[in-house]
């Protein structure tokens, strides 16, 4: 029996496609390719630990004594850290964090921030300012930690409060206790502090460091200016604010260590 000519032509056309389909369906599944490793940019976490004379600062409940002999407690301590800079003092290379404004508020557990995308280089100094630089201090229409809703903007003047310290001056008779309010701002009280970094701090991809900084609340009240609560309990500006600013730039902050995570 002869195969019709038309059927033969259709069979000839279909055979190559059938072969390709069978080849694909019978082949082994390709091996899954591993995902490329994630490489993190160099970074540094800056941590602030709050103390009074070597002991952790306890808000509201604990009573402390300052250099003037005043008994006091602390109900609030918050301040701005800005313009963080890492420097290599040997070759002059500098890393400056962009948009560098951080509100530290231990009562809300805001005690650290991270410097991201640090160049893969060696640094031996860290600097930062307490307060807000004059350019940013001209406007309150700013996001993030500079948002006025953070309760760090003057309500009677343009600009930011750089540091707030609040508490109570405790007296033998509780009825005589006095509220302590130290609010410091204004461009003249913008202060920069610099600390040397010991050891080899060389950044590289996937390499992170911790910078641990001690903040002594008592030092805010004693060096170089002794703040006597019998004389000073309410500061919003003027020469007493300048005294507090000198204190937070001279001894309140100290670098404990910089170490690799």
Image (cartoon, rainbow, N blue to C red):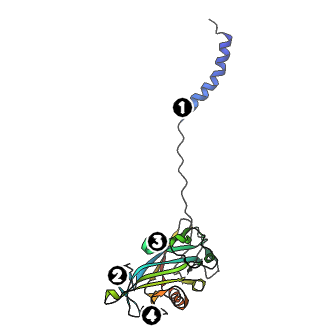
The residue lying furthest to the left in this view is 173
The residue under label 3 is 110
Question: x and y percent of residue 95 in the render?
Answer: 61, 74
Of mark 1 and mark 2, the one earlier in the sequence is 1
The crowd level at tag 4 (other Cα within 10 Å; few <14, some 14-19, many 20+) is few
The residue under label 4 is 231
The crowd level at tag 1 (other Cα within 10 Å; few <14, some 14-19, many 20+) is few
Real-space Cα distance between discs 2 and 3? 21 Å
Q: Nearer the viewer, mark 1 or mark 4?
A: 4
Real-space Cα distance between discs 2 and 4? 22 Å
Query: Helix, strand, or loop for circle 4?
Result: loop
Contact flag, marks 3 and 4 (Cβ < 8 Å): no
Report whether 106 appears left or right of 89. Answer: left
The residue under label 1 is 26
Q: Quadrant of residue 145?
A: bottom right
Q: Nearer the viewer, mark 1 or mark 2?
A: 2
């Amino acid at each position: 029996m002869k195969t019709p000519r038309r059927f033969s032509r259709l069979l000839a056309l279909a055979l190559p496609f059938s072969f390709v389909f069978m080849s694909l369906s019978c082949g082994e599944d390709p091996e899954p390719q591993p995902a490329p490793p994630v490489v993190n940019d160099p970074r540094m976490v800056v941590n602030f630990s709050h103390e009074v004379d070597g002991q952790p600062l306890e808000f509201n409940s604990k009573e402390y004594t300052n250099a003037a002999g005043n008994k006091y407690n602390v109900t609030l301590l918050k301040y701005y850290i800005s313009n963080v800079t890492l420097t290599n003092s040997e070759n002059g290379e500098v890393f400056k964090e962009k948009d560098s404004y951080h509100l530290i508020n231990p009562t809300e557990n805001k005690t650290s921030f991270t410097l991201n995308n640090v160049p893969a280089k060696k640094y031996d100094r860290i600097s930062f300012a307490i307060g807000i630089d004059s350019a940013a201090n001209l406007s309150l229409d700013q996001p993030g930690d500079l948002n006025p809703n953070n309760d760090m903007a003057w309500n009677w003047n343009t600009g930011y409060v750089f540091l707030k310290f609040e508490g109570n001056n405790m007296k033998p008779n509780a009825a005589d206790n006095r509220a302590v309010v130290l609010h410091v701002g204004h461009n003249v009280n913008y202060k920069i502090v610099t600390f040397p970094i010991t050891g080899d701090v060389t950044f590289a991809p996937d390499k992170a460091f911790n910078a641990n900084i001690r903040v002594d609340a008592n030092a805010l009240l004693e060096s170089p200016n002794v703040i006597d609560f019998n004389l000073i309990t309410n500061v919003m500006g003027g020469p007493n604010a300048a005294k507090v600013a000198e204190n937070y730039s001279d001894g309140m902050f100290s670098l404990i260590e910089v170490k690799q995570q």
